[in-house]
Amino acid sequence: MKIGLLECDHVREDLLPIAGDYREMFADLFRRHAPQLELVNFDVRNGEFPVSTDACEGFVCTGSRFSAYDPDDWIQELKSFVRRLRDADKPFVGICFGHQVLAEALGGKVEKAEQGWGIGVHGLDVLKQESWMQPEQSSCGIQYSHRDQVVRLPENSVVLGESDHCPVALFRVGETMLGIQGHPEFPAAYVEALVRGRTELIGAELVNAARFDAQTDEAIITAWLAKFLSELS
């Protein structure tokens, strides 16, 4: 199954030796836990968009250092493409920034969280079990690195999961579009290096309290996302 990876940013050059760029991280994640998915890369951050919604059978949208409410032309074009995917009933999964773009594109709202940054491993507590959540698990550990959060959902949305710092950690719009705030693709070493490099911005107390090496369940989460994408294609 061909999945279009909408790349919304690139890893800083000094961090590339840890796990490569976003496309390498996602390729490694799917190779280990969802080998039936074949990635086709689109560097949307630099204006490389699919020629149509039929370019792939489904799409995954990556994280980014940018905000979903930024006025940049490529972000506006990405939102327009998300709306086209919705109208075409095309399967879509947004990760972190992609999760937030999904909300903003379809009428929701994203803003900086009053509680500040979410970093390191937190739980993703399932509020509503869906058929594609196989194997079933009520809570999963996942890496986070974000300051923005979804604060208002689009119409026809349902919250499927929350974390201790993020009330909308997993949500679905309609039947074909899914957003997840955490990063199943990020290895612990990458998250720690990324976050520690932002200590001045985030705050030393929060960075030093973060758990980077706690247990994560990216195998289960990736299986869920793959099943969501494949069931709808």
Image (cartoon, helix red, strand yellow):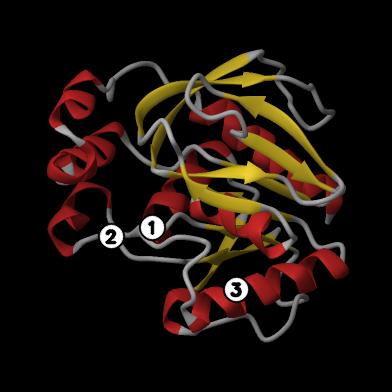
Residue 88, given in percent of the width and then of the height, sits at: 86, 69
Disc 1 and disc 2 in contact, CB within 8 angstroms: yes
Residue 38, given in percent of the width and then of the height, sits at: 60, 59
Mark 2 crowd level (few <14, some 14–19, many ≥20, 10 Å Cα): some
Q: CA distance from mark 1 to mark 2?
A: 7 Å
Q: Residue furthest top?
A: 138
State which mark lies toward you, 3 or 2: 3
| Residue 22: mark | 1
Give, as a three-letter code, the residue at label 3: Leu
Give, as a three-letter code, the residue at label 2: Val
Q: In the shown orientation, is residue 115 left or right of residue 135?
A: left
Residue 213, given in percent of the width and then of the height, sits at: 28, 21
- Above or below, comparing residue 101 to residue 121 in the picture: below
Q: CA distance from mark 3 to mark 2?
A: 19 Å
For residue 43, say whether it is visible. Answer: no
Dot 2 falls on a residue whose secondary structure is: loop
| Residue 166: mark | none
Q: In the shown orientation, is residue 26 left or right of residue 159?
A: left
Disc 3 and disc 1 in contact, CB within 8 angstroms: no
Give, as a three-letter code, the residue at label 1: Tyr
Q: Nearer the viewer, residue 35 or 93?
A: 93
Q: Which residue is mark 3?
A: 78
Dot 1 falls on a residue whose secondary structure is: helix
State which mark lies toward you, 3 or 1: 3
- Above or below, comparing residue 147 to residue 131 in the picture: below
| Residue 11: mark | 2
